[in-house]
Each structure stands twice: as C-alpha cells, then as structure tokens.
Image: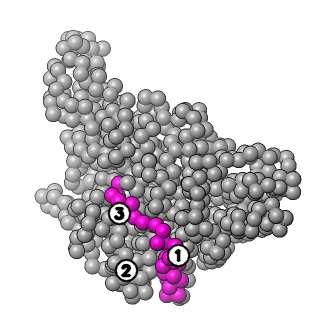
Amino acid sequence: MKVNRLKVIVITLAAALLIPLSCKKGFLNQTNTFGATASATFTTSASVIALVNAIYDSYQNSNLLKKGLWYYADYLPHDWFNNGADIAWNNYTYSGTFDALPDFWDNLYIGISRVNVALPIIKTAIANGVVTPALGNRLTGEALFLRGTMYYYLTGTFGGVPLELNQTTNGLTPRSTQLQCFQQVVSDMQAAEGLLVSKTQLAATDLGRATTGAAYAYEGSAQMWLAASDPGNASAHYTAALKAFNNQEFNNYSLITPYVNVGEFNNQNNSESLFEIQFDLTGSNQSWGDSWQPPGGELGWIDSFSWPSEITGEGYDYGSPALYYSYQAGDTRKLATIIGPGDPNISPGIISSQWHGIQGYPNVVGAQATANTPLSSVTTALDPKHHADSINIIQNRIRYTDGTGSPTADQNTSNPINTNGTLANPWYGTDGTPRSGFVCSKKWRDPTLTGGSGPGALFGSQDQVLMRYAEVLLSKAECEIRLGMTAQGLVDLNRVRSRAFNGTPPAIWQDGNLPQADGNGKPIPAPVITDPLQMVFSEYRHELTGEYSLMYLLRRAGIDAATNVAYDRELLHLWNTGPASQYPYGSRPNSFIIFPYGPTHNPPNAIFNDLSGNQGVTYNDLPQGRDLLPLPVSEIALNPNLKQNPGY
C-alpha cells in the first residue's frame, strides 16, 4: 500500500537517494551510494551537493514534461492536437486512468520527498562543517525552490493536493485546498530568495541551477494564483506579486533577439531563461536503446514527436490553423512557433545544419530519388506491380517536391521540397489519419534529430524551459493592469511586443483573422482589442504557446467578474470560434471541423491520403471543471483520503 511505499522512498532516500542519477552539463553527476547510512554518506561537500542534485533529476522525465506539463499547457487551449494514443485530449475526454498521470504525480512527489529528506541533512552538514554556511544556505535554497515549483505545477494542474512537508509520512495525507497549496509555494519561494544566489554568480558549469531570479518569478506567479483562489483579497495578492516581479534581480535577464533565437538548440541556458530542465547527449546513440530510459534519462523524446510524419514517420502533434491565422501581420513569432503548408523551417540551427532546412532530411532525400525515376521505366500496361511503382513515383513527386513541374510527366522537373508541404499539397501525414497540415516549429530546433527516419534519432538533448523572462514581463503587466496601473502595464506588454515585431509594434492590437469565413469564403479579420486585460491574454498565447505555461496562466486568471465565467473557458471559446454569435461550423463536440479558409480548408482526396475532407481540427468548448486534470486513479486507490476532482 502507499504507506509502505512512501516509507521505503523516504528511508532509501535518506540512505542513498534510491538510484544513481545524472543530468546535463556536469553539475548533476551522481555516485551510487546505495546501502550507506546518511551519516556515513554525507561527509563531504560533494556528497551533499549530490543530494540536492538528485532533486533536479525528478524533472528529467519525458512523460512528466511532455505528457504532463506540455499536454496540459498546450492541448487544453486547442492550439495543438494529438495524433496517436492520446486523442482524448482533443475533446477533453481524458480520465484518471491516463497512463502518464502517475508519472506526473509520482515524479513530483518523489522530488518533494527528496527535498524533505535533504533539508535536515544539509542543516547537519553545515553544523558539522561538512559544507560552508554559504554553500549550505545555497543548497537549502535550491531544495526549497524545487519543492515550491513541484507544488506549483501539481496544484496548477490538479487543484489542491496533499502537502507533504516532513521527512516521514504515513502516505494518507488528504488534499489541502488550492489556496493553501499556493501559500506553501509562496512560503518556499520567499525562503529560497534569501538563500539562493544571483545568476550572475553562477559558474558556467552551474548554469541550470535555481537562482534568486527564478524564485522571484515563481513567487510572483504563485501570488497571482492566490488572487484567483482568494478573490476577496485579490488586490493585496497582485500587489505582492508585483513586488516580486519588480525585484532588481530581473535586471540580470533580458529578452533574446530576434525571437527565433529564444528556443535555438545552440542558445540554451541563455539570458532569458529562468528555469530550464537540463538534458544531455552522453554518447552517439539517440535511438530507442540509449540513455533516455530511467535511471539516468539523459535524453528526451519530447521534440521530434511534434515534427511532420513526412519527416519522422511519427507526427504525434499538429497545430491549429486558428492559432496560425491569429498572429497579427508582422509578428515574427508566428513562423518561429507554427508553420503551415508552403512555410520553411526558419530555425537558424536547422538551416545551417547538415539538413539545410527541410530538404536534407533522410525521408526527403530518399523520396527525391524515387521522384526522379522516369515513369517510362516502370510503366507497363496490365502489370499491377509496375502500376503500383508508377503511383509511388507520382506520390513522392506530390509529397516531396515543390510542385513546379507536373507529377505525371515522364521526367521529374520539380525541385526537392524545402517547406512543410506546399500550398497545393499540404503535409497531412503518411498514415491516412487526421492531421491539419500545421506543425510546431517551436519544437523543431534540434539538428541532431531525425525522428524515426534515417538513423532513428528520436531522443534529443534540447533543454526544456519552464520559465523565462518574457513570461515575467507579461505577468507583471497583468498585475499592473488589474491594479489600475494600465499605462505601465502597456509599457511592459510592448517590451515583449517590440521584440516580436522587430521594432515598434503596431499601435492597434488585433489578433489577425478569426477562425470564420464570410459568405465568399474569405477570412474575417479579428476585432481590434481595446481591453488591456485581453491584450495580456493575447500576448500570453502568442508568446508562450507550444511551451509549458499557457493553460496555467489562463486558469490562473480566475473568474471574469462581468460574466461569472472562468476566463480560461471564455478565452478558449473566443480564440477558437470568434465573438460572433453565428459560427459557420458550430461547436460540435467529438467532431472534426474543416477550417473555413486557407490551403487546408478543402483538402483534396489525394490518391495517397484520402481523408474525405477530415483534417483533425476539432473544437469543443472547455467543459466545466475540465481545466483541472483528474487525480490518477492509482493514487486514489493507495490513499483513500484523496477525493477525485468533480466530473471524473
């Protein structure tokens, strides 16, 4: 039962941290001390550092990051959809039996257990002179920061959760309220702020460790969660959040320019990053058999699974055209975030790599060789095999060339494709299952990956950034606007927008086009945004979608007092249907929608991909209560004091 399991975790951690662990860029290397006692193990400075390093390792899990945090942050707003075993996320029908929920829950609670064990050991190490007070205080701050972030994500995802703050537990702790949990996050962050060091004081080998700035960032966000959880005192909580966001430590951070460089593979742990989960390629094998598996888990399968199946053979995520068309004209974040038919991958790292953009990937090169085969060399009347060969040649010309020549000509005169499909022939996937033709370019930055094609390099060492400075500025702007400091809020919003537009942003705020067409099939421009709070929400979406924050920030916004409806439900309806009362395709639960305009609005029934006009773009209003995920049923079975969230 859970009681025994937690006791085993605590006892084992106190003795040995359970397993040998390691993480990126050297600072998290571990030694296996299984079977030793705490007093015998933690007798050197290095061993105490290793104790804290093991807490970081709790985050280095692809199921936790991708199927937990990323699914919640990005599938729920309907900016992104799943193609695979997890399509329940496309219409909010996920349940407490979803296989990644225990990974989410257990990894974070294991991390919390490690913190609770580490704190008294560090205290003793300071008293015994094993570590200096300065180092001991910093390590204590790191542990408190990490526990705070773990409760931040648990509570943001599930609502109130059990607060485990002691070294031992019977495993039967009931759920605390959401308010109590975020109060604990604030407490941990405030304690950490006085113990951590500035990013400017970290050695290069320590980049990725918690810093004072990161603690203030999470404290500020947690204070905003308190405002949503305690609306009667919202003003005080927003004031406290603003105080955290105004800390001078943020003078050590900056917005990376241009925007596309924010997520570049060769620009990790940069001056915009506040909290970044470290990964590393320790060998040359990036296929299923290498160190992505725990223990160790040096690689993540997170990024290449979002690429087109035409490149990787997978294509498990795809984007919403509603997001693509919502970017205001001139916003450079668009193609750095989502690309559609006819768009190149604009990542400098991908362009300068051995792939030279999209054209050099193994699947494209192989298909081009097939496309260059003269049809006359395989076409023979009444020969089914040769007929199939000719169809294969034509298919590859349609799918993997730029379409400048006729696919049915004897000789191929088209060029190799260097875009994400073409306007005439979007990339809908290679397996006949629904996809939109749009993909997440924000996750297409690692030049060492090929997905399931070529060498099968699916697992990469791209760090995963959970918090960056742009989010701090946008959250700060929200606080200022809610407190009546609208002019200053707009200044902070425009700091982010100026980077997005490579200079002075448009004076008019407008979200591109609505996901609606007029009577002539043309897109309807979105209305001008005049409400400053709606400007904040628009910026959250266009700056942070495809990362690890968006849905958390929308739920954090709380209830719209004017309508008594949660902001997240209002915004998702607005973004996916527009404000007009008449939506031409309706809000149809559990159904697919053909997007009303653009290159994918009326997809051809191509001979290699007959989807009958069904491209996997769904829209459902967010059901009441579904902005909280269900608790894993396995955890409820172990702890009868846990009560499931309503509606599950």
Mark sitting on residue 542? 3
3 or 2: tag closer to the N-terminus: 2
The residue closer to the viewer here, 176 or 606, is: 176
Q: Which residues are magenta?
A: 234-260
* 413 to 159, vertically: above or below: above
| Residue 127 visible here | yes
Q: Main secondary structure of the magenta part?
A: helix
State how far apart marks 1 and 3 are (Cα): 21 Å
Q: Residue furthest left?
A: 520
10 Å crowding of disc 1: few (<14), some (14-19), many (20+): many
Residue drawn where x is 48% and y is 79% of the image: 246
Disc 2: which residue: 489
Mark sitting on residue 196? none
| Secondary structure type for disc 1 | helix
* 406 to 228, vertically: above or below: above
Residue 182 placed where, x, y %?
60, 74
Mark sitting on residue 220? 1
| Residue 617 visible here | no
Q: Are marks 1 and 2 in contact (CB under 8 Å)?
A: no
State how far apart marks 1 and 2 are (Cα): 15 Å
For this view, does 167 lie left or right of residue 364? Answer: right
Indicate the amino acid at tag 3.
Answer: His
1 or 3: tag closer to the N-terminus: 1
* 174 to 244, vertically: above or below: above
Residue 520 lies in what quarter of the image? bottom left
Residue drawn where x is 15% and y is 29% of the image: 406
1 or 2: tag closer to the N-terminus: 1
